[in-house]
Image (spheres, rainbow, N blue to C red):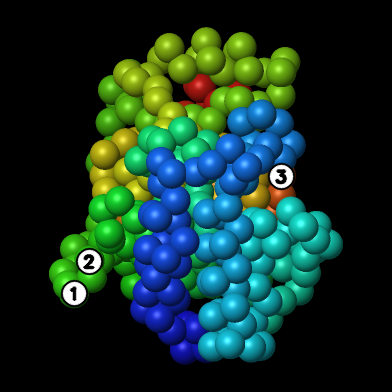
Amino acid sequence: MTATVDVTVLADLLRRAAKAEILPRFRRLGEDEVRAKSEATDLVTEADEQAERMIKAEAERRWPGALFLGEESVAAEPALLGRLADADLAIVVDPVDGTFNFAAGIPAFGVMASVISGGETIAGIIYDPMGDDWVMAEKGGGAWLRRPDGEARRLRAAEPVALDQMVGMASTGYLPQEKRAEILGNLAKVRFLTNYRCAAHEYRTFAGGHVHYLMYNKMMPWDHLAGTLISQEAGGYAARFDGSPYLPHHLAGGLLVAPDKASWDLLRREVFTV
């Protein structure tokens, strides 16, 4: 299915970009290399822009027929986002997911890419520059932790547990103001709530079987396409708040990920009452 884009080549490209443009700038950013976009916590750095520039140039050379959609490309040209729904083949990239952490010197950030074909996500890659490994999946092939030496380990989502034993992550900052307090109150029903401010590591944590739920309300394709596919290939269940599948062109509707549909239904009914 992914013959048009060699996923191993794309994964290696993310790694090379991280080593060339991201890691050398970690904890070494100058004041003029960090800027706010929509708000004070929505940042872009020189690392984001240079890494995306490198990935884009190489991707367009290797796969000239594919639409390239990067977070920073869309920030510069918002109309690009509307082309995703009709693209025969697309590569969607987040050059530094967790930019707030990166800029603050916190080692929890990642590089993500997904491959879209015919309106569905067929491959997802999340590279961790600090750990130097990938979590990745191709549709129908399972989710895998892969290392540069060739080691590979299949990943599986956690087994379902009772609501009061669930541990997970929820990005509550983008919920509607009138619902935020209600949902934060509902979260007292679970065992633990946390948030890494980095979807890349949150999806990796879910696919590795360490948490029982993820919830997001802000929906941008570079943040969620790779991780959703990886979570599903690890055996998890993912859907928008109305129960419909999450597709590449969706920019609203929220997203809830759980070990299985029964857990998803329970969380949706008792906690995430959006």
Q: Which residue is mark 3?
A: 252
Residue type beneath disc 3: Ala
Q: Residue at x 57, y 18 (%)?
A: 183
Residue 166 appears left or right of 48: left
Q: Mark on residue 150?
A: 1
Q: Residue at x 54, y 71 (%)?
A: 54
Q: Nearer the viewer, residue 27 or 67?
A: 27
Quadrant of the rendered structure where residue 216 is? top right
Give the vertical position of 164 relative to 37 (above or below): above
Residue 207 appears left or right of 256: left
Q: Residue at x 63, y 62 (%)?
A: 70
Residue 57: x and y, percent? 59, 78
Query: Is there CB contact under 8 Å for labels 2 and 3?
Result: no
Check disc 2: other Cα within 10 Å, few if <14, some if 14-19, many if 20+: some
Check disc 1: other Cα within 10 Å, few if <14, some if 14-19, many if 20+: few
Residue type beneath disc 2: Arg
Quadrant of the rendered structure where residue 107 is? top left
Q: Nearer the viewer, residue 89 or 159?
A: 89
Real-space CA distance between mark 1 and mark 2, rounded to the nearest whole angstrom: 6 Å
Real-space CA distance between mark 2 and mark 3, rounded to the nearest whole angstrom: 34 Å
Q: Mark on residue 147?
A: 2
Q: Nearer the viewer, residue 242 or 155?
A: 155
Element type at mark 3: loop
Element type at mark 1: loop
Residue type beneath disc 1: Gly
Q: Earlier in the sequence, mark 3 or mark 1?
A: 1
Query: Is there CB contact under 8 Å for labels 1 and 2?
Result: yes
Tag count: 3
